[in-house]
Image (cartoon, grey):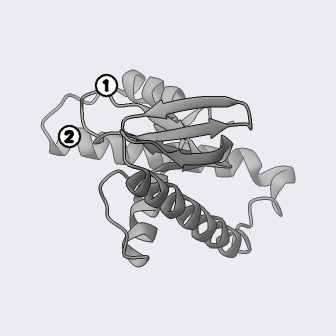
């Protein structure tokens, strides 16, 4: 899901969290209506995530928290109720600000106006811009620049820009 985020989406979530003065540890992943919250520290090791958009209830237990999803499925997790409810509330607030920010930016998107004849030109320009950026980054770090591999990565991670 991280790879499907809009380019810079993770950075935007981080910026919103900083504006709201939230902790930057355990930031949620937000894509559309989905709000994924990590139960552990986000690192190179695996951690479990919960979908807060499907969470319909929470209750404190002696040793953790009981979560209810879709009014039916119950799950007990080894995390304090206070900490988990704070993470869920922060994710909801970040999601609200993110949606309002994207709606404010939407008024400046003109690509829908030029869909008829200019759409292929715009897509080719976007692809070329991403290609040049990736080639420059590889070259600056001393890696070989192989155009076919860059195009494959662009198709794999950003989808075909067509």
Residue displayed at 49% across by 63% down: 90
Residue 160 placement: quadrant: top right
Outermost residue, right direction? 116
Near-viewer residue (70 or 149) = 70
Rate crowding at label 2 as few (under 14), some (14 to 19) or many (20 or more) other CA atoms within 10 Å: few
| Quadrant assignment for the C terminus | top right
Near-viewer residue (138 or 54) = 54
Residue displayed at 40% across by 40% down: 64
Name the secondary structure under disc 1. loop
Where is residue 32? Give x, y as percent: 66, 49
Rate crowding at label 1 as few (under 14), some (14 to 19) or many (20 or more) other CA atoms within 10 Å: few
Q: Earlier in the sequence, mark 2 or mark 1?
A: 2
Where is residue 76? Give x, y as percent: 48, 32
Q: Is residue 150 left or right of residue 144?
A: right
Q: Is residue 142 left or right of residue 65?
A: left
Residue displayed at 46% across by 28% down: 151
* Residue of label 1: 146
Where is residue 61? Give x, y as percent: 45, 42
Asked if residue 23 is positioned above or below residue 118 in the image, the reply reads below
Asked if residue 117 is positioned above or below residue 71 in the image, the reply reads below
| Distance between mark 2 and mark 1 Cα atoms | 10 Å
Near-viewer residue (111 or 98) = 98
Residue displayed at 75% across by 49% down: 119
């Amino acid at each position: 899901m991280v790879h499907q985020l809009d380019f810079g989406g993770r950075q935007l979530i981080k910026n919103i969290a900083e504006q709201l003065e939230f902790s930057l540890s355990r930031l949620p992943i937000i894509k559309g209506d989905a709000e994924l919250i990590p139960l552990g520290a986000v690192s190179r090791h695996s951690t479990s995530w919960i979908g807060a958009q499907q969470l319909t209830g929470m209750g404190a237990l002696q040793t953790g928290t009981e979560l209810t999803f879709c009014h039916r499925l119950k799950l007990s997790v080894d995390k304090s109720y206070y900490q988990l409810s704070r993470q869920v509330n922060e994710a909801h607030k970040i999601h609200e600000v993110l949606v309002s920010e994207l709606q404010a930016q939407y008024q400046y998107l003109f690509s829908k106006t030029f869909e008829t004849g200019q759409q292929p030109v715009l897509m080719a320009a976007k692809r070329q811009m991403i290609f040049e950026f990736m080639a420059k980054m590889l070259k600056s770090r001393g890696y070989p620049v192989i155009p076919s591999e860059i195009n494959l990565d662009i198709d794999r991670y950003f989808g075909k820009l067509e």
